Amino acid sequence: MKHLTLLFAATAAALVVHPEGNPQQTSLVEDKPQVAVQDAVQTWWNSLPNPESLFTAIESRIKTSLQHVGDVTKGLDFDPDSDSDDDGHPHPHPPHHPPRRGGRHHGDKTKTIYELIKDNKYTTKFAKLVEENDEIKSLLDDTEHNHTLFVPTDKAFEGIPHKPKEPPSKEFILSLLKYHALPGLYTARHVLHSHTLPTELSPDSLGDHPQRLRVSLGFLFSIRLNLYSKIVLSNIEAKNGVIHAVDGILVPPPSQAKIISLLPGSFSTFSLGLEKTGLADDLSKSDEAGGTLFAPTNRAFQKLGPGANAFLFSERGKKYLKAILKYHVVLGETLYSDAFYNKKKDDGDEETNGYWHVDLPTQLDDKPLAVDVKSWKGFVEIVLNGFTKVAFKDGVASDGVVHVINSVLIPPHKHHGEADETEREYSVEELKERLGPYVGGGEVRDL
Ligand SMILES: *[C@@H]1O[C@H](CO)[C@@H](O)[C@H](O)[C@H]1NC(C)=O
């Protein structure tokens, strides 16, 4: 899964790493209001070198961080004795090493978050962006509400392409800034106990729900956000919240479709299927906000066997392929491993914990996909239809979330009990029988 993980990081880290990067970032603040946020993200992408070199850049970045193991641990600032706020949702590997003496960063409780980053000589670049943006400035200066800020250090701005073909718009900068702030107070411990975190950014494409950050553990228990941005200094207290310094700018993620198309090494078969059946087109026209995509890897398709693949990707098998693919797509409901944006409920987002079950309506005639989320001592497992385990969870996207699976989902038999079908091949006859009810006499019903 390392390869895949790196590529996911590449997806989100595009802005951050550039092999021939230049530390200057003047182009970041130029004004271009007519460009929508989406376009700006796209533009950033297009201005980047080929994914190959991006990949290399990220790999070398990871190697570098391995060489500086000492640095990696520096930012960790837990006090194992202050366990009283334990919310029963710990991460699998609490740090073994004792907290460092003198390693606490108390900040200054007489100053706001904004004042602290403005006065700090390591955060001048981010502070400058904030200063030029009244909305975010007043948010971080507001003492009525607590906030958490992930502030990229000046070093994090190194490597941004000096002259992108199109400078990002004001909206893009605003989204970027909002994506670094969380409503409420999250200490390092709270961050570590989460799988995803809600930010101040709430795009239309998510139905105004918060865009989330993905939390994971890096080397020696360092905390990483969206895989590539490491917390290097934590728990800097302010009058109105807490600051954590990070070594990578948090770029709002691209769409589900973009993520899939950027990772051909893992999803070329799935992509081909989406194109070939016209489903990619149908989905791009959908005006549902949010969604959950279960993306089968190339290996997942291989497992179906050569006969099944030849059939599904033939003209005659196309409608069956379309039915299968639709069964992997949920629109309007966004399910993370610890939160659920459910369109049927108006009373806000559901933060989840422990064991829970939900049936997600798929694009295949609303045929439900049974999802079990089991978290135990910080481990979390998402299981579909009883047997298919999500291999990579919570791939955050601008329009929902992508979970990666290593088996293709086939709608279960109508009358038989559940059986593990994740590792077996299918014959053409069997596929026709299983999918018959959904393809009808002729075409698969349109979206
Ligand atoms: C912010 O958090 C601190 C520490 O938990 C708390 O004492 C304070 O009342 C909070 N302030 C607001 C405005 O919620």
Image: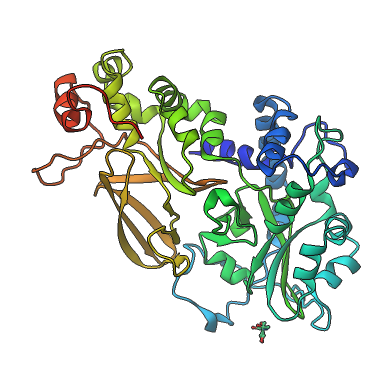
Q: Position of residue 243 (x, y in %)?
A: 73, 69
Q: Residue at x 52, y 26 (%)?
A: 264
Q: Is residue 223 left or right of residue 176?
A: left
Compared to residue 410, the image places residue 81 above or below, namely: below
> What residue is drawn where x is 62% and y is 54%?
225
Tell me: 28 left or right of 337. Answer: right
Residue 447, located in which quarter of the rendered image?
Answer: top left
The reply to whether residue 3 is visible in this rendering is no
Count every numbered label the image shows and give the total: 0
In this picture, is 57 found above or below 289? above
User: Which residue, as the protein is rendered here, is positioned at the far left?
Assistant: 415
Q: Quadrant of residue 244?
A: bottom right
The answer to which of 416 and 41 lies nearer the viewer is 41
- How far across and how far down the image is residue 219, in percent? 61, 52
Q: Is residue 127 left or right of residue 183?
A: right
- In the image, 37 versus 388, the foreground residue is 37
Q: Residue at x 49, y 64 (%)?
A: 91
Q: Quadrant of ligand 1?
A: bottom right
User: What residue is shown at x 54% (from left), y 30% (from top)?
Assistant: 263
Q: List x then y, in percent, for residue 257.
A: 52, 34
